[in-house]
Image (spheres, rainbow, N blue to C red):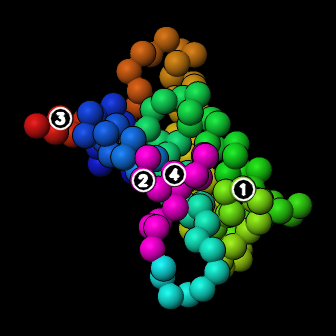
Amino acid sequence: MGCFRGTEPFILRTLEWLRAELGAGPFLRRYRMDDGVGGPEGGFILCGFWLALANRIQEAEDVFVAHAEASNHLGLLAEEIHPLTREQLGNFPQAFSYLGLISAAARIDRVLRLRDEGQSEPPHLLEPEPPAIE
């Protein structure tokens, strides 16, 4: 959300760890334990959209499309999505899922527009740029 640059090695390592530990294709689970609620734990749609904010534009577009296509025939998104069956799980509809969708869409659009204008540095949402992580 603009607190760190998407190109920071710390952020990139964190995303790689999250994908390895919690990833299910383009989706991302919140955790891998029994939460006591019952039923399967799906990909948490909000977390998945966060993957689209890391300045890797092709990956961001792929993740965005997979999550957007998880909506039903009315364009509604649940809280979670089953990574294999694409069944919507959890609270429905879920406002957080739309916050993720809007944030990711705006970020991808901005990256593409700046790239088309010849800017090679990915955009950062806060001004001035935060210091690099040491």
Residue 58: % across, % down: 58, 28
Q: Is residue 95 visible to us here?
A: no
- Dots 3 and 4: beta carbons under 8 Å? no
User: From mark 3 to mark 1, how far is it between C-alphas?
Assistant: 38 Å
User: From mark 3 to mark 2, how far is it between C-alphas?
Assistant: 26 Å
Q: Which mark is residue 132?
A: 3
Kind of residue at badge 2: Glu
Region in magenta: 20-33
User: From mark 4 to mark 2, how far is it between C-alphas?
Assistant: 6 Å
Q: Tell me the residue that label 2 is attached to.
A: 21
Residue 43: % across, % down: 59, 61
Q: How would you rate the neighbour count of disc 3 (Cα within 10 Å): few for under 14, some for 14-19, many for 20 or more?
A: few
> Seen from this angle, which residue lies furthest left?
134
Vertical relation: 9 (above or below) 72: above
**Residue 3 falls left or right of residue 70:** left
Picture residue at 53% right of the left edge, 15% below the top = 117
